[in-house]
Image (cartoon, rainbow, N blue to C red):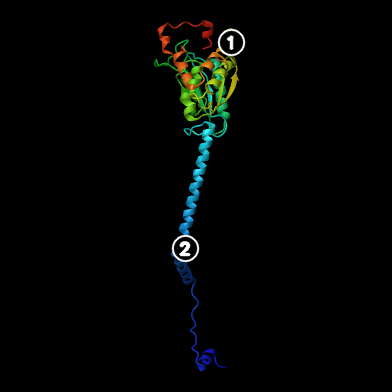
Amino acid sequence: MQDMDSWSRARGYAASPVLPEPSKTQRRKDGASRWQRIVTSQSFLLGASVGIGFSWCFNQVQLVLLSDEDAHRSRASGTTPADPPLAGGYHAILIPAGGQTADGPPPHVLARLERAVHLYEMSPDPKPYVITTAWGTPHKPCPQDASGFERHEAQDNAKYLLSHGVDPSRILEESVSLETVGNAYFARVMHTDVRALRRLVVINNHFHMPRTRAVFGHVFRIPPREGAPDAAYELDFVEVDDRLPRDVLEVRLQKEEAALPKFAPGGPWQSSTPTLRDLHDWVHRENMAYASRRLLKERAPLDPALLKSY
């Protein structure tokens, strides 16, 4: 029996050459060559360019929409982008001034500081700021340190916080004010407005809390100027023990009871300071702790019993 090649030659057919199977390496090279021809073709490049351009445009539109939404939320909440609100808990813990001794904070101020440390420790990360307030009080001079420099109350209280584990980067000192209105006003214009710290807790003793609520509630509510919306602050108030001797506490309660009607809602002070601009005028023209006309007369001495509560 003739083989296939003999049969093909007998009938005038040319036998097809038998080619070897391509190797795996050769198949990979052939596949790469075909893919290279595809990706360098004009139709592929045109389609890829259109797809990339469409994706870029879509992303830009999405970014604009998200930016507009964020801006709308900021305007609606009254916040500024200077320091975005912190996640969870309070943005800041405020400690109104209460007095000093030669050895540091007196017992009633220590009660405020102890609660501030507790709130700080219990707060989630990122931790809130802790704002200490006051240069001192107009009723007595500030104590001095070993080098003869004046110790401000905000400094004394900040030193206590540092010694009890509060991160120094989370402490903000307000070393300007001399009384309760100043504590609130200067804390707002120096720190909370600037850093957009909106959720605040204010710590004070029972004897001082009614006036603290009236003053801080007003200062952190009023708009910066006429026609602007009210400030977007959320305030909580935490009371702590008085820790004053009974006789001193009774004198101090009498003073607080006499002063409260002036500062309460509907009273003359809130009515005369409807905006932060009006409050600025009142602080520097009417408040005799700061108004320069205080220098036209001698400082009046304070009742010795009342002085023990400062």
- Reading the image, the residue beneath label 2 is 44
Q: Is residue 143 left or right of residue 244?
A: left
Q: Is residue 188 in view from this perspective?
A: yes
Task: Determine which of the numbered discs, if any, sits on residue 89 in the image.
Answer: none
Q: Nearer the viewer, mark 1 or mark 2?
A: 2
- N-terminal of the two: label 1 or label 2? 2
Does 10 appear above or below 99? below
Q: Is residue 296 left or right of residue 227?
A: left
Q: Residue furthest front?
A: 227
* Between 107 and 248, the one nearer to me in the picture: 248
Task: Determine which of the numbered discs, if any, sits on residue 257 in the image.
Answer: 1
Q: CA distance from mark 1 to mark 2?
A: 84 Å
* Between 10 and 24, the one nearer to me in the picture: 10
Mark 2 crowdedness (10 Å alpha carbons): few <14, some 14-19, many ≥20: few
Mark 1 crowdedness (10 Å alpha carbons): few <14, some 14-19, many ≥20: few
Residue 280 image point, x, y percent: 46, 19
Q: Residue at x 49, y 6 (%)?
A: 302
Q: Residue at x 55, y 93 (%)?
A: 2
Residue 113 image point, x, y percent: 54, 21
Residue 51 image point, x, y percent: 49, 56
* Between 100 and 232, the one nearer to me in the picture: 232
Does 106 appear above or below 127? above
